[in-house]
Amino acid sequence: MNDKYSRLLGILKDFDSAVLAFSGGVDSSFLLRALKDSGIRTLAVTAASETMPPDDFNNAEALAAMTGITFRRIETSELDDPDFTRNPRDRCYYCKKELFAQLSKIAADEGYAAIMDGNNVDDLSDWRPGRKAALEHGVKSPLIDAGFTKDEIRALSKELGLPTWSRPASPCLASRIPYGMTISKEALKRISEAEAFLKGLGFVELRVRSHPGDMARIEVPKPEIGNILAKGQAEKISRRFRELGFKYITVDIDGFRSGNLND
C-alpha cells in the first residue's frame, strides 16, 4: 500500500466517525474511498443549491452508492444571503459558512466525531476564503494532514479504480461571475445551461464566464478553440447562447484557465 495512503488511513482511524462535505469531485471522492477503507462510521453529505452544476449532484450520489457509504442531500440557500450575492472577493466564505454550520448541527445531533473536507496541499497556495469558514467550524482536512497534492490524488485514484481520477474540476457556478457583479438565480441558470450545451457538443473542460452587458466568454483548452469557431459550430453556439439571453458571445484566445477570475 502507498505509504502516504497508509498515513491517511491512520489519521482517519483516530476518529471513530465523520461527516464528509462531499462534492463528488476528485478530492472528496478520494477521501470518501479512504474513509471506507478506514472502517470508521461515515456520512457523506452533498449540498444542493442553484450554484451547483446539475450533473454534480447525480455524480456525487452515484459515487457514494458505489462505495456503500451513507449519503444525504441537504439544501443550502446562499442566494438568500446578501453578503454572498453581492459577490465580494471572499464570496466563498459565506457559502461555506452556511454549509459547515449545517454539517456541524448534523454531527452534533447524530454523534459524529468530526467534520471533514477534501482540501489538499495545493489548495493552501490558492485563494480559498472558504478555508476560513472551515477553520471556524473545526473542519478537518485529512488530505492536507497526510500531505497529498492534487497530482498524487489523481494518480492514486487511478490505481484504486476511482472513476473520478481524470475528472475536470467543477467549481460552483458563481465562480463564473466576476467579483463585484451581482449573483442571481437567473445568471446561474443561464451559465449552467450554456455549459451544458457545450458539453453536449463534446467539449469536456470548459467555462462560460458571464460578464456585464450580457457577454459570455467561452474558455476551452487552446487546441479546442478551432472546434468552437468551426463553420456551422460557431453559428450553432451563437444561436443557443442568444436564446439564453447573452447578447455578445466571445472566445478567450488564452484558452481555459481554472480560477482565472482570481488573477
Image: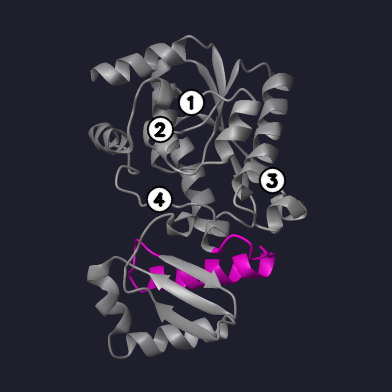
Q: Tags 4 and 1 in contact by the CB under 8 Å rule?
A: no
Residue 188 painted magenta: yes
Question: Which comes sooner in the sequence, label 2 or label 4?
Answer: 2
Q: Which residue is mark 3?
A: 75
Residue 39 visible somewhere in the drawing = no
Q: Position of residue 177 (x, y in %)?
A: 56, 64
Question: Which comes sooner in the sequence, label 1 or label 2?
Answer: 2
Question: Which comes sooner in the sequence, label 3 or label 4?
Answer: 3
Vertically, is 168 above or below 29? below
Magenta-drawn segment: 177-206
Instruction: Compare residues 252 and 180 and report the one nearer the observer.
Output: 180
Instruction: Compare residues 226 and 49 and report the one nearer the observer.
Output: 226
Cα distance between the residues tagged 2 and 3: 25 Å
Residue 131, image quadrant: top right
Q: Position of residue 53 (x, y in %)?
A: 53, 57
Instruction: Compare residues 260 and 109 and report the one nearer the observer.
Output: 260
Q: Amino acid at mark 2?
A: Asn
Image point (61%, 15%), residue name: 113
- Element carrying mark 4: loop
Residue 120 is tagged as 2
Cα distance between the residues tagged 4 and 1: 18 Å
Cα distance between the residues tagged 1 and 2: 7 Å
Counting other residues with Cα less than 10 Å from the Cα at mark 4, is it few (<14), some (14-19), or many (20 or more)? few
Image point (52%, 62%), residue name: 176
Residue 172 falls left or right of residue 76: left
Q: Amino acid at mark 4?
A: Ala
Residue 211 visible somewhere in the drawing = yes
Q: Which residue is mark 1?
A: 141
Image point (45%, 52%), residue name: 170
Question: Which comes sooner in the sequence, label 4 or label 1?
Answer: 1
Cα distance between the residues tagged 3 and 4: 22 Å
